[in-house]
């Protein structure tokens, strides 16, 4: 039976307003992605060699993942990967490169639980931790204050040397929730990111599903076609 867009099936035939509110809060309460006046333009891909993932990248990512957090659908606790009893970073590095080589991610990586904040597996969280140190957007603990401080330093230096400086400010409404995946691929290609790296990101977003967990029960799985993980 196909439910209307404003209904959530808990598996036992019950519909819960609590779960429905959680879905809406999480930004997945609409059945259709946002519409744009113009289609996403095509950008030619950038081809070239890409270095494999190294343990020097994986180790800091493992350290940054906080302990005591929700496990996600795979029930693998953060403490397992932060344990001193084994070299988890070395194992994860080999595993990540195997995923890239086979172009296939574990099924658990394609699932998440909304409570109402989406929780993805810890291993998948580790891969997305490897970001540029210059990036402020979508980075925990790095807000507008950091970006404003960097902008202020740039302004002072350019004023001192009497050189022109151009700054662009962009504020996106519900940036995490409403970004179509096609726009992410477009933005990456527009920046000249190697197509091999974009393929890695595509694997993390392919056939992604989520479900809502609340006191009233857990909803059926539904596809995620918009938003940033």
Image (cartoon, rainbow, N blue to C red):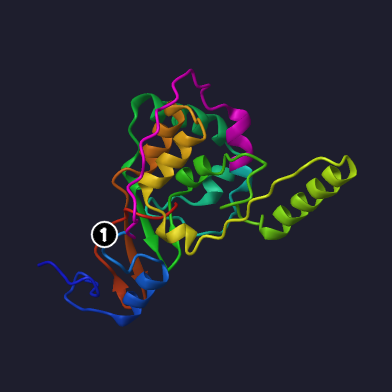
Q: Residue at x 67, y 41 (%)?
A: 133
Q: Quadrant of residue 25?
A: bottom left
In this rendering, the answer to whether 61 lies above or below 120 is above
Q: Quadrant of residue 101?
A: top left
Q: Nearer the viewer, residue 109 or 47?
A: 47
Q: Nearer the viewer, residue 111 or 27?
A: 27
In percent of width and height, residue 205 lies at 36, 44
Mark 1, other Cα within 10 Å: few <14 / some 14–19 / many ≥20: some
Taking 176 as reference, is 39 left or right?
left
Residue 146 within the magenta-colored segment of the rendering? no
Q: Residue at x 26, y 59 (%)?
A: 222
In percent of width and height, residue 161 lies at 88, 39
In percent of width and height, residue 140 lies at 61, 55
In percent of width and height, residue 100 lies at 41, 28
In this rendering, the answer to whether 82 lies above or below 217 is above
Where is mark 1, residue-wise? 222
Quadrant including the N terminus:
bottom left
Q: Residue at x 53, y 59 (%)?
A: 69
Q: Nearer the viewer, residue 17 or 121?
A: 17
In this rendering, the answer to whether 221 lies above or below 86 is below
Residue 44 within the magenta-colored segment of the rendering? yes
Disc 1 is placed on an element classified as strand
Residue furthest top in the image: 49
The stretch of residues the image draws in magenta is 34-61
The number of numbered discs placed on residues in the rendered structure image is 1
Q: Residue at x 72, y 59 (%)?
A: 145
Taking 34 as reference, is 94 left or right?
right
Residue furthest right in the image: 160
Q: Main secondary structure of the magenta part?
A: loop
Q: Is residue 89 visible?
A: yes
In this rendering, the answer to whether 1 lies above or below 154 is below
Q: Is residue 83 visible?
A: no
């Amino acid at each position: 039976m196909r439910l209307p867009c404003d209904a959530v099936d808990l598996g036992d035939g019950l519909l819960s307003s609590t779960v429905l509110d959680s879905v809406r809060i999480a930004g997945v309460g609409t059945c259709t992605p946002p519409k744009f006046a113009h289609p996403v333009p095509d950008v030619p891909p950038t081809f070239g060699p890409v270095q494999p993932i190294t343990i020097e990248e994986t180790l800091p990512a493992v350290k940054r993942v906080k302990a005591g957090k929700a496990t996600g659908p795979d029930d693998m606790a953060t403490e397992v990967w932060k344990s001193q009893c084994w070299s988890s970073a070395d194992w994860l590095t080999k595993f990540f490169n195997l995923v890239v080589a086979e172009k296939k991610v574990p099924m658990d990586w394609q699932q998440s639980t909304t409570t109402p904040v989406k929780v993805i597996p810890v291993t998948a969280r580790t891969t997305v931790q490897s970001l540029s140190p210059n990036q402020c957007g979508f980075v925990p603990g790095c807000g507008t204050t950091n970006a404003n401080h960097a902008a202020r330093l740039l302004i002072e230096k350019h004023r001192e040397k009497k050189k022109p400086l151009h700054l662009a400010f962009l504020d996106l409404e519900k940036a995490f929730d409403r970004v179509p995946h096609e726009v992410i691929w477009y933005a990456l290609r527009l920046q000249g990111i190697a197509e091999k790296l974009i393929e890695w990101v595509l694997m993390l977003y392919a056939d992604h599903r989520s479900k809502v967990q609340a006191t009233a029960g857990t909803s059926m799985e539904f596809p995620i076609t918009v938003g940033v993980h």
